Image (tube, rainbow, N blue to C red):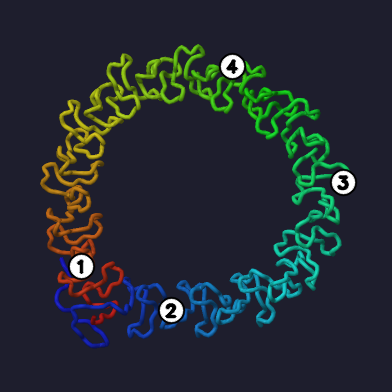
Amino acid sequence: MGGRTGPILHLRARVLVYSDVYNYTNYLADNNYTNYLADNNYTNYLADNNYTNYLADNIYTNYLADNNYTNYLSDNNYTNYLADNNGTNYLADNIYTNYLADNNDTNYLADNNGTNYLADNNYTNYLADNNYTNYLADNNYTNYLADNNYTNYIADNNYTNYLADHNGTNYLADNNYTNYLADNNYTNYLADNNYTNYLADNNYTNYLADNNYTNYLADNNYTNYLADNNYTNYIADNNYTNYLADNNYTNYLADNNYTNYLADNNYTNYLADNNDTNYLADNNGTNYLADNNYTNYLADNNGTNYLADNNYTNYLADNNYTNYLADNNCTNYLADNNYTNYLADNNYTNYLADNNYTNYLADNNYTNYLADNNYTNYLADNNYTNYLADNNYTNYLADNNDTNYLAENNDTNYLADNNYTNYLADNIYTNYLAVNNYTNYLADNNYTNYLADNNGTNYLADNNGTNSLADNNYTNYLADNNCTNYLADNNYTNYLADNNYTNYLAVNNYTNYLADNIYTNYLADNNYTNYLADNNYTNYLADNNYTNYLADNNYTNYLADNNYTNYLADNNYTNYLADNNYTNYLADNNYTNYLADNNYTNYLADILLC
């Protein structure tokens, strides 16, 4: 096993030379001899050394770029051409960003310098005609001057005064830029296309009507207003007869249909809000439904179902009349004022708690009951956190004082037996003492010495607490559950394996180590078959992932030096990169670019003296 040794003859410029150090500059082909980089005379190049930028295909027919890689003719897939084979007419710039013409060199997008554009890359929006005489838009396709037929102009050449939008549909002003129809954003219109009916004044401050001239906002003198600018809140009808509100749109008297009044004429007593949705009182202002801030409602719009009494003290239901708090007499409460804690359902059938919200019977969904209707037998505490018994009152989880727990809430893991003699875990279900059949204890009653974790899976010590398997934090394990395979000695000094028993550090007699204590430098794999280094961590055989080997197990044939810098062969010792003296190289470290075959017969690239 091993590579060729001694000096090797190499051809360069038809002269035999000796060399101990080489520089692989000009490649002729890739490793499979499939894709050639240049011909045998190194005259015509097909691609650069990284096989990234190709100059031509393998038969030297279609060129991608000239020999200096300066002017590109096409991309690597020969899909998008940059220029014709003579490099005369360019189709795009070197980064394929701005195209000058299509692949047939028929329709031009810009001139050869990529300065003046005629259209965008999709040939959809044209900027100018082929003679660059009449421009349609600027280079960013932002501001258009005319439509594609050069018939209707949109703006002057300075893009200052606009005549119409990009489609030439909606005009902004007449051709003399005298009378404006709308602003530049086509948002606010001043008049119709005939300049007959005005919508607003020139400052777009005071509006007269909407864009359809349907709903008027004010008369032509801007004296009497009918509605606000959004046409939402009306002040009066079109005849200015019946007023709905004052000019500031602050105080409303009635809704838009003049059907339901919102306040009396003095704006003193309000009957409803501005949207005519929530009523404050009936039309006579006698019975109030809510306060003036529309915050606290007393009854629905019909004055039928009351939500609270007149002092807004005791609430009967929420604003949507969905969840009731009490009956109409405010006698039996269903929930508190925040609708957070419910006492009973809407039919007063199933109670959730007593009237003082002290003792709860069930949660809001009536799913989990806390006690029976007589408050005799409790199932859980008020927060539904700690359960005392299951719903059938069969298996108790804790006593009535919620002090000593027997099991956790799902009645799965018991904390103690019914006599509270033998505990299985503490009250917060954190530290378990034993599994449910009281067979295998996890810790003693004082929670001092732990025997296993909460699932009874990983043991910390045997039942006598004599031989410890791990420390109390379950961080550092000493052995597996059978106390057979140790992970470390009792002082946690020398580790044999990690916590998952996956990667072993040493055998049980601490003779042959697999890795150091921090699992950084591995010496061998788990089967002690393939060694990574000797016990002194001096000579490495492979890296930690067992991917790149440095030498075989006998340290006879080396694959690379200790820094993994210079490789001699691949992991199977099949393809050699250099001989043992690192003198004559066959390929680079990544096995990507080969210089010659294993017999140094057929060269893939020339070898230059450094």
Within 10 Å of the Cα at label 1, are there few (<14), some (14-19), or many (20+) other Cα atoms?
Answer: many
- First in sequence: mark 4 vs mark 2: 2
**Residue at 20% across, 85% down:** 17
Badge nearest the viewer, 3 or 4: 3
Question: Circle 2 sits on which residue?
Answer: 56
Label 2 crowd (10 A; few <14 / some 14-19 / many >=20): many
**Vertical arrangement, residue 546 with respect to residue 150, above or below:** above
* Residue 577: image location, x then y, percent: 22, 70
What's the CA distance linking mark 1 and mark 2?
34 Å
The residue singled out by tag 4 in the image is 349
* First of labels 2, 3 by sequence position: 2
Q: CA distance from mark 4 to mark 1?
A: 86 Å
Cα gap from disc 2 to disc 3, whole angstroms: 83 Å
**Quadrant (top left, top right, bottom left, bottom right) of the C terminus:** bottom left
Disc nearest the viewer among 1 and 2:
1
Number of the label disc, if any, that sits on residue 240: 3
Marking on residue 568: 1
**Of the image marks 1 and 2, the number of the one nearer the N terminus:** 2
Please name the amino acid that badge 4 sits on.
Thr
Residue 587: numbered disc? none
Residue beneath the point at 61% across and 74% down: 139
Q: Is residue 91 left or right of residue 222?
A: left
Gap in angstroms between the C-alphas marked 4 and 2: 88 Å
Residue 218: horizontal and vertical position, in percent?
A: 83, 52
Label 3 is placed on what type of residue? Tyr
At label 2, the amino acid type is: Ala
Q: Position of residue 97 (x, y in %)?
A: 52, 72
Q: Is residue 261 above or below residue 582?
A: above
